[in-house]
Image (cartoon, coloured by chain):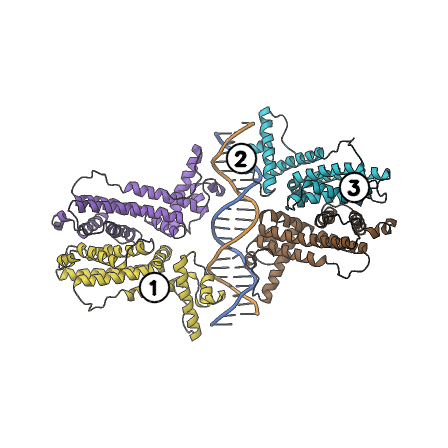
Chain colours: A yellow, B purple, C cyan, D brown, E orange, F blue
DNA sequence: CATGAATGAGGATTCATTCAT
DNA sequence: AATGAATGAATCCTCATTCAT
């Protein structure tokens, strides 16, 4: 993945536990205070280890963040996979994907923002960030292409750009919803996002189906 | 607006010049390095004044940022106004609005991100940020409501939530486009954003017109 | 007096007014905040003049303090003089002197403390302080010597040392009373101070007189 | 005691050594330069530690001063205790008390002055100062009351106010003697202070005894 | 005389990182 | 593997003083 180097080889069981505790603590600290404001002291206190111990496992604050960010990105990958043989019609599947998409971003909104900050200065983070985005963009683009091939979506739409825009709509809403406190319940949000998404790509079989809502 | 206090009354011409130079320099510095990483010394060097002079005009880095953010928000308001008697059909008007919207956010993307960061800790900035968002959200919601009243858009859509989502799509694309380096030319982007937007709200008179593009 | 140099010659009437305003403002500022904490800005604001003007009249903050301290010392000299042909018996005269002494120190307690602070570093201030003390010490010592010569007080007491100690009692009480908030009314305080003072020096004609209180 | 918080728990032997060195250095620095003029860098240099180490043990200059002041007050308490079964007649015991009193104040004169300065702004220091004063005042007042009960001192004197005044005489003399350089040897000073004190309270058994000195 | 903008030395404080134990 | 004391570069901010107008 990203080329951030961490000290993680040849650890005893105890060492692995300590290391894991630090990553967990780091994730909390970054999420609560942001990258700059998060203190190594705080991380160590949360993990229940002393100052010096931190440097047994990580070279620097940055390398801890790399680890945390990698874990988050991994989770988001996993969490957003709609079972390949997902049931139902295209609309329902888009809805399911949007629900997972929204949840994945909502759960990690602040850390992804941080990763974006970090990406501005560190190329390693930039790569990680682009990789994260690319996975979601490709997934969206492929889904659209498949629908286009099946004659269910407007074939003139550029799949990649469309996926970026509509994916961005979901991602951005996750941010507004959670970080900025816009009031909405998940169900309503997912339904509306899906309706807009489906209409935007001209999902044919849907025009009547979801009119019943 | 935001409740950040600045020293700005009763200045001589020279004072106003210096102050303006500091704001300009601050905007550059923040835009280049981000809020935390921006150094007051750097700002002073850019403005060609000494250390202490900064504090003649501002209480702190924070208060300078407040000034810069206020200016940016003001510019974005102004820049995004579509002439009330904008020509043409609804689709063309949405397109014009999207173009301005995209440009406004693209021009200030980094500073708005910074404002979001700052909003996490400082209530004054949070207010400024919410105010900024609200203006765009309201504008979008009112546009949609008007179309709904004219029978040109799906009347079942919640105007506010829809405006947030579709506005977010544009805003987020501005970020991906400029900050993350996604390749696209403005024309293509605006056209696609508009097509998606129009379809999403079920803009009637359009379904055939622009299908020929 | 002290060898603090001030710019005070050849001033116009307007100049003298400004200068006086600065001294007055300085006295207030020093009394309220202490020497270190008093700000030249604050002094200028109180005096209603601009920053730069201060340096037309004084070389430095220190020289302003010199002026203020000199004025205070002068006032204390004046205020503490018991009319040479003060009426009544020795006891009554000691009482009158104590009342004035107490008032003089109470009125200027904080500024004298400041002068003591300043005296630690600046010889000019040290001289002024010693001069101030000396005046009071001498006055007390001479009073005692006169009583001793008249056979009214214990002739074995060293006049200077005794005056320092008993004068210190009054001076210190002024401090405790006003600066530290010890509750007591002036009348009671003066009566007790005088009784203690009179007894301490073995004032003969008094042993019965004041027993009637 | 005072509500100044210090970092002092769970230290290793090395930590305790460093901390103690800082307190010692701080006491010296404060005593030499005064509170405001004392530099943290100077304290660190004296203690032989680096800049940052200071903040491992203290939050601020103020908290170091709190520690130093607390230590001084503690020492003064201890140093001024006259053995309960002190030998001899009342006069001799007053003399012993005065000697200890004078020494205690003389040894810490400057730091107590500093505490008074600090008490003007910080309530924690004000409390510490008042506590210090109160101990001495009470001790004096109780001594006097005992003598009054035994019929050895003027029963009409208010014990507290009298103790404040006569205690102030000793305290103030310590200041004049040491800080202002009034020449006197301890023996003479203590004898005179005691004579004045004893006469002032009308100590009966003494009037003739010590008149022969 | 008055103004107020500009200066910059100086000081307190933070915190990631190192290292002896 | 863990500890926690020590480090010092880096940064913000203050305020007495100077100077051009």
Please tell me which residue is depicted at 25% across the width and 66% down the height of the picture: A81
| A55 or D101: nearer the viewer | D101
User: Label 1 lies in what chain?
Assistant: A
Name the mark on residue A72: 1
* Mark 2 Cα-neighbour bin, 10 Å: few <14, some 14–19, many ≥20: some
Residue furthest to the top: C13
Q: Looking at the rendering, which quadrant does residue B17 occupy? A: top left
C-alpha separation, residue under disc 1 versus residue under disc 2: 57 Å
Numbered marks: total: 3
Q: Which residue is mark 2?
A: C45
Q: Nearer the viewer, residue C202 or B37?
A: C202
First in residue order: circle 3 vs circle 2:
2
Tell me whether the residue at label 3 lies in contact with that at label 1, contact meaning CB atoms closer than 8 angstroms.
no
Residue C182 is left or right of residue A77, and the answer is right
Tell which residue pokes out farthest to the right in this image: D212
Mark 1: few, some, or many residues within 10 Å (few <14, many ≥20)? some
Q: Can you name the residue that lies furthest to the bottom here?
A: A13
| Residue at 54% over, 33% down | C52
Subunit of label 2: C
* 3 or 2: mark nearer the eye: 3
Determine the chain carrying the residue at label 3: C
């Amino acid at each position: 993945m990203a080329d951030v180097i961490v000290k993680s080889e040849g650890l005893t069981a105890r060492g692995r536990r300590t290391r894991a505790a630090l990553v967990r603590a780091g994730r909390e600290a970054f999420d609560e205070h942001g990258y700059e404001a998060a203190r190594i002291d705080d991380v160590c206190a949360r993990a229940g280890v002393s100052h010096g111990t931190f440097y047994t496992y990580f070279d620097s604050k940055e390398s801890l963040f790399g680890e945390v960010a990698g874990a988050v990105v991994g989770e988001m990958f996993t969490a957003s996979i709609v079972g390949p043989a997902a049931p139902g019609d295209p609309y329902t599947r888009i809805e399911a994907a949007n629900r997972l998409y929204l949840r994945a971003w909502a759960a990690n909104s602040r850390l992804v923002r941080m990763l974006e900050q970090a990406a501005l200065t560190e190329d390693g983070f930039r790569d990680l960030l682009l990789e994260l985005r690319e996975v979601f963009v490709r997934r969206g683009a492929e889904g659209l292409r498949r629908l286009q091939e099946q004659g269910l979506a407007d074939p003139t739409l550029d799949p990649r750009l469309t996926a970026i825009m509509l994916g961005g709509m979901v991602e951005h809403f996750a941010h507004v919803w959670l970080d900025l406190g816009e009031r909405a319940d998940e169900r309503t949000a997912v339904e509306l996002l899906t309706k807009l998404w489906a209409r935007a790509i001209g999902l044919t079989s849907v025009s009547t189906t979801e009119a019943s809502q």
